[in-house]
Image (tube, grey):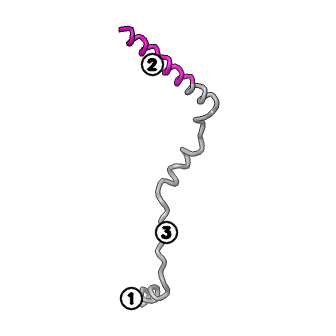
Amino acid sequence: MSVIYVLLAISILVAVIFFIAFIVSVKSGQYDDSYTPSVRMLFDDELVKPKKTTTKKLKQEKIQLNKQV
């Protein structure tokens, strides 16, 4: 039964240490980032490079368009 008290004391001590470390990091500005969240939605998708078309393909498309008209 005394082991439970020792483990309980150690766990509370560890929790207090982590809580103090969290408070110190918040006070020092570790989590202050007001710029990234506002810009994150703009760069959510990966950039897709357009396919390169050759002049031969462009000429063929132009001929096909002229035939349709």
Residue holding disc 3: 49
Residue holding disc 1: 64
* Quadrant of image for the C terminus: bottom left
Q: Is residue 19 left or right of residue 29?
A: left
Residue 60 spot, x, y in % from top left: 42, 89
Residue 28 spot, x, y in % from top left: 64, 30
Overall secondary structure of the magenta section: helix
Residue 67 spot, x, y in % from top left: 37, 91
Along the line of sight, the residue nearer the viewer: 10 or 25: 10
Give above or below for 6 relative to 29: above
C-alpha gap between disc 2 and disc 3: 53 Å
C-alpha gap between disc 1 and disc 2: 76 Å
Please name which of the two marks, 2 or 3, marks the residue nearer to the observer. Answer: 2
Residue stretch rendered in magenta on the structure: 1-20
Q: How many neighbours does mark 1 have within 10 angstroms: few (below 14), some (14-19), or many (20 or more)?
A: few
Query: To which quarter of the image does residue 26 belong?
Result: top right
Question: Which numbered disc, 1 or 2, marks the residue that appears first in the sequence?
Answer: 2
For the point 36% across and 88% down, which residue is it?
A: 68
- The amino acid pointed to by label 3 is Lys
- The amino acid pointed to by label 1 is Gln
Q: Residue furthest right?
A: 28
Which structural element holds mark 2?
Answer: helix
Q: Residue furthest top?
A: 2
Residue holding disc 2: 11
Q: How many neighbours does mark 2 have within 10 angstroms: few (below 14), some (14-19), or many (20 or more)?
A: few
Please name which of the two marks, 3 or 1, marks the residue nearer to the observer. Answer: 3
For the point 60% across and 44% down, which residue is it?
A: 35
- The amino acid pointed to by label 2 is Ser
